C-alpha cells in the first residue's frame, strides 16, 4: 500500500515510491512555464513555492496520482472539498459523547496530552469530543494507530475534534 505524500516529503522519496508522480508534477510545471528536474533534497513544499501554486493543490494532484487522497484527507481534513466537510460520521450520532474542554489547561500552560490520553483510555464505546483553540492534527496519527477515527470542525474560532474507536 502506498503512503500519502505531504509537503515535507522530498521529490526523491516520492519518486522512489511512485515514478509516475513526476508526470503529475511536470504537468503543473509546464502550465506555469517551468521545466522541472528532481533533486534529492527538494520537497513538495519547495516545488509549490517555486511554481507559485498552493501547496494543498499540489498535494492533491500528487496524492491523486498516487491513489492516496483518502489518507491525505484523514491527515488534513481541512483539505476536504467543501461539499464533503459537512458530512458528519454516523458514529457521531449513534454514540454517547464525552466532552473535554482543554482551553483552560492550555491557557494555564499545561499540555493537555496526558488528560486526553487518560480520557481515551476510558471511552468504552463513547465518542471523545475535544474542545480546543486549535486543531489537534498530531493526534490524528497517534490515535489513528490505535484504531480511532476522527472528525473535526471549526466554529467561531473554536475547534471541535471528535474521536471514536472503530
Image (tube, rainbow, N blue to C red):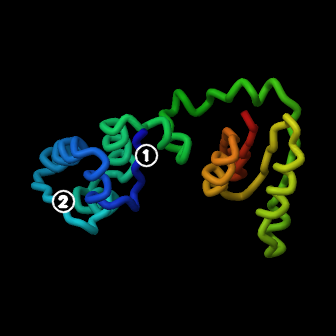
Circle 1: element type: loop
Residue 26, image x and y in percent? 16, 47
- The residue located at (31%, 48%) in the rendering is 17
Neighbours of disc 2 within 10 Å: few (<14), some (14-19), many (20+) = some
- The residue located at (35%, 45%) in the rendering is 57
Could you tell whether 36 is left or right of 50 in the image?
left
Residue 20, image x and y in percent? 22, 41
Residue 2, image x and y in percent? 40, 42
Circle 2: element type: loop
Residue 13, image x and y in percent? 31, 57
**Residue 140 visible to an observer of this rendering:** yes
Which is closer to the viewer, label 2 or label 1? 1
Could you tell whether 141 is left or right of 11 in the image?
right
Quarter the N terminus occupies:
top left
Could you tell whether 78 is left or right of 88 in the image?
left
Q: Nearer the viewer, residue 9 or 135?
A: 9
- The residue located at (85%, 64%) in the rendering is 104
Q: Are marks 2 and 1 in contact (CB under 8 Å)?
A: no
Q: Nearer the viewer, residue 126 or 99?
A: 126
Q: Which residue is mark 1?
A: 3
Q: Which residue is mark 2?
A: 38
Neighbours of disc 1 within 10 Å: few (<14), some (14-19), many (20+) = some
- Which residue extends farthest bottom? 109
Amino acid at each position: 500500500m502506498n503512503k500519502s505524500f505531504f509537503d515535507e516529503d522530498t521529490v526523491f522519496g516520492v519518486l522512489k515510491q511512485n515514478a509516475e508522480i513526476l508526470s503529475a508534477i511536470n504537468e503543473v510545471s509546464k502550465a506555469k512555464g517551468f521545466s522541472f528536474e528532481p533533486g534529492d533534497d527538494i520537497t513538495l513544499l519547495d516545488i509549490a513555492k517555486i511554481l507559485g501554486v498552493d501547496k494543498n493543490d499540489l498535494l492533491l494532484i500528487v496524492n491523486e496520482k498516487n491513489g492516496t487522497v483518502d489518507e491525505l484527507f484523514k491527515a488534513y481534513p481541512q483539505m476536504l472539498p467543501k461539499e464533503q466537510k459537512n458530512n458528519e460520521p454516523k458514529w457521531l450520532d449513534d454514540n454517547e459523547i464525552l466532552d473535554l474542554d482543554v482551553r483552560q489547561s492550555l491557557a494555564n500552560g499545561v499540555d493537555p496530552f496526558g488528560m486526553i490520553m487518560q480520557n481515551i483510555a476510558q471511552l468504552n464505546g463513547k465518542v471523545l469530543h475535544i474542545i480546543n483553540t486549535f486543531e489537534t492534527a498530531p493526534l490524528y496519527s497517534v490515535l489513528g494507530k490505535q484504531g480511532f477515527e476522527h472528525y473535526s470542525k471549526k466554529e467561531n474560532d473554536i475547534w471541535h475534534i471528535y474521536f471514536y474507536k472503530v
